[in-house]
Amino acid sequence: MAATPVWSVDPRTGKRLGEVAAEATPAEVDAAVTAAHAARGALAGREARVAFLRAAADLLDASAAEVTAAADAETALGTPRLTGELARTTYQLRAFAEVVEDGGYLDVRIDRADPSLVPPRPELRRSKVPLGVVAVYAASNFPLAFSVPGGDTASALAAGCPVVVKAHPDHPATSELCAALLRRAAVSVGLPEAVVGLVHGFGAGLELVRHPLVSAAGFTGSIRGGRALFDAAAARPVPIPFHGELGSLNPVVVTPAAAAERAEEIGAGLAGAATLGMGQFCVKPGLVLVPEGPDGDRLAGALAEGLAGASPGVLLDARMRENFLSGAAERAALPGVAAPVAPAADGPHGVAPGFLTVPARRLVDGPADGPHGLLLEECFGPVTVLARYAGPEEAGAVLDRLSGNLSATLQLSAAETAGEEPDGPTAALLARITGLAGRILVNGWPTGVAVAPAQHHGGPYPAATSHSTSVGGTAIERWLRPVVYQGVPDPLLPAELREGNPLGLPRRVDGVPEGPTAPL
Amino acid sequence: MAATPVWSVDPRTGKRLGEVAAEATPAEVDAAVTAAHAARGALAGREARVAFLRAAADLLDASAAEVTAAADAETALGTPRLTGELARTTYQLRAFAEVVEDGGYLDVRIDRADPSLVPPRPELRRSKVPLGVVAVYAASNFPLAFSVPGGDTASALAAGCPVVVKAHPDHPATSELCAALLRRAAVSVGLPEAVVGLVHGFGAGLELVRHPLVSAAGFTGSIRGGRALFDAAAARPVPIPFHGELGSLNPVVVTPAAAAERAEEIGAGLAGAATLGMGQFCVKPGLVLVPEGPDGDRLAGALAEGLAGASPGVLLDARMRENFLSGAAERAALPGVAAPVAPAADGPHGVAPGFLTVPARRLVDGPADGPHGLLLEECFGPVTVLARYAGPEEAGAVLDRLSGNLSATLQLSAAETAGEEPDGPTAALLARITGLAGRILVNGWPTGVAVAPAQHHGGPYPAATSHSTSVGGTAIERWLRPVVYQGVPDPLLPAELREGNPLGLPRRVDGVPEGPTAPL
């Protein structure tokens, strides 16, 4: 059977830019995984991993013009955005080098032997070890930061796990280029290039998650695709962890006081957040609870003004454009829904942003699986839904209908943010939305997920299929498992567990933190 | 339809001791989960949880005579062992109270806003929140420490999650008694009793893991039962984490030098470890790699002597006894297998311990799914298998055939433990078995899993279905998910995240540990 070609396509024109590769056969997937598995020992040394992550960042930075040009040609995301995304990507690689150097992620714990206990306690020394080959499924919407050189790859390599990336079909040429740069960086620091593999094709993605030598998977994408892979990971003879980020509505609640105080500012901010990257952010605010009445009307007016002034643009691929246009139209056709600025086609390849409004009671009066439930599902692209609520009970009833989210946001007034009543309604509202999401914002917009040690980019299903994060320092924890050594003589212990702490790691000894710390 | 009665049975006689309860109907499971869910807010305060865990420990201790009598009647484990198990159980409850007080499990991380970064970094404050109702599946072999008042329950309550326990049919009366004591302890500190629920019956267990308000599950038991529940948890519309401990062979490797030096000591130690609790430990050493030749023969002789002197005993139930006898007989009948001390029936209800030997090459010459593969599967009860190996390659080939384990053990000589060659064969062997298990021992026996901050009781599948632990301080992490607050004003933040650190928690600020620590 002839190989199935993989084409790079320009979404601005729908034209093929070139044949980039071929879809991987099962034998090719097996070869990539087997080579990655064989290379895993080379990632055991932390100096090598640190050097590799930094070399990869340097090489990507040095190739910035080539990388962003390749990505722009395939994604139409534009050079400014892609330049920023590349900077984020290389910052992230370097940040994981720091995480490795710090060593706190190993969560070293030492319990000394205590013969006075009944039964006597043996000496226990606990650290973490890498899981093995990690399968990474690249996202459509971030061809760099959530794709080949992105957070899943960076955190897995930092943990000591080789990766095999399944490229996203929206940017195969960028994927090939980035994989080649990562491999060149590996070789430049003395590592085998097989620590980073790349495969193309839907079937290859399924082969990958089922491969016996694959130990874990990271995924960013749709609920449908992600759930199919999650199910395959769980159904294996030996199930593996599947860390998937699948979809999010990112609800925003605007209080009456906030609308009274800042209607125009909130409306304009929402217009920006809903159209950033042509609405192709997993943290795009997709449902905004806005009070009924004139303040809410002003907010809607500012949003309409902002969207009317927003430029039309191009989505990542033709299928995505079709889904956006049909999804927006289907929602707009529901009883009670209005489209003050209707999302629309713009020429044969572009789209223009818009928004819908609906009385909040429409979202809660019928059964949860009724037609209006569609408005509580993510619609990928530049559209958002304003649900106009009559009072806090109605807003709360809408929140009760929501699935899990990556983010949830409150827009509050100055008096509410002052929080003078710790057990008052604002604190209660904050506690309520904490149950809905992995990241909680006040008076901000969820678009923009900072790469930072404390970041958490995940949330209840379907935002994520696990309770981990795909951004931030703790993303490394996904690729490790703890191991405890009992009664193992010091010279035989891994260096991170030796009594003399030769690596200078933060650790807990008999439950008490020990190590270099800042004063309280 | 009449309720299906649940009987307490004496395994020493096979006689029914009394009707304890009825199997829960779907409506009863729903009622227990709904009540637990409604009670979850009461566990939000950490003082309440600490008081509850300590009150539960005190009440169990005060009821020791009643509890151990109930457990002995149903399990035949004997008063000394059950007295020890109760002490372990109440120690564990108190240890989790300390974990809650320490607060390190929240893994608080604070990143300050940094407007100098591109893009500017917002302020991020990350902590963890409880998942919600946890389903706990009690184990057969530890009616206290891994059942109603056991580690899953203690860690879930410590995390702030109400529990509904599915009782094990081997000890329903003990389960009812312990659940009543836990509920009484809850009420004594002002908590609703619904924070601890109890249901009986196989069907109820499946209902429980499928209930929409159940957020996670903990399980200790067989591969068959655990995998069925794991599959149900993964197949839910909203999948939930299933932390199951399913089975383990707990391999032991005796080096030629260790056999030469300590054959009799190792043989006698193995006899004790393989028969402790009538071999009904998930960490029973079930496969021991022993060198061929006279030193290994001496070891086998000491094991035979130890087992010949071991008392017969009673297993937890009649089905387990049948499985033990048939499983041992099936293994003993395999080509090349000998039974120097044959496991056997002892009267109509008892069994006598034994061991089998097999040339190691038999385990690796055929295909992995050949008949000798049975010797690499756990056989619950007082039997172990000595695999006699000709050299390190053969021993290594056997290790390559093994599934994941809770523990793996090396028996080394004094010279080998001195570890004078950091890259020598002993270190390589230790690294190799680290890939097999969650706990690694040198010159000890895996039976005995200390309750301690650094403990890890888990391992690659099927030892565990996740990379977490069911014993030790970090077991609490299973029942929490991270949440990050972005730009949330201080007065609205949860107490553990406020700038002034009113709870005095250890935390990382801009990546650097801060807080009360011991000097290096």
Image (spheres, coloured by chain):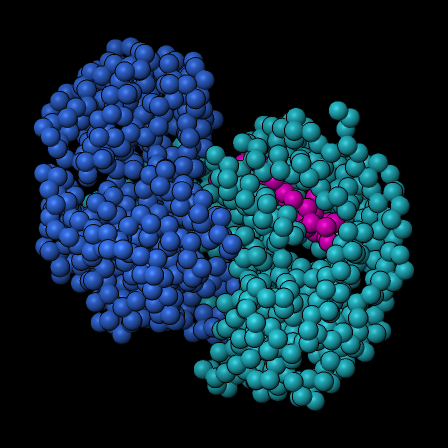
Chain colours: A cyan, B blue
Among the 4 quarters of the image, the one containing residue A291 = bottom right
Residue B353 showing in the rendered view? yes
Question: Taking B110 as reference, is A17 left or right?
Answer: right
Question: Taking B173 as reference, is A260 left or right?
Answer: right
Residue A448 showing in the rendered view? no
The span shown in magenta is: A129-154
Q: Where the N terminus of chain A falls, by quadrant?
A: top right
**Residue B250 forms part of the magenta stretch:** no
**Residue A148 forms part of the magenta stretch:** yes
Q: Position of residue A431 (x, y in %)?
A: 49, 73
Q: Is residue B515 above or below residue A227?
A: below
Q: Position of residue B146 (x, y in %)?
A: 27, 48
Among the 4 quarters of the image, the one containing residue A45 = top right
Residue at position x 69%, y 65% in the image? A284
Between A337 and A304, the residue placed more toward the observer is A337
Q: Position of residue B293 (x, y in %)?
A: 29, 10
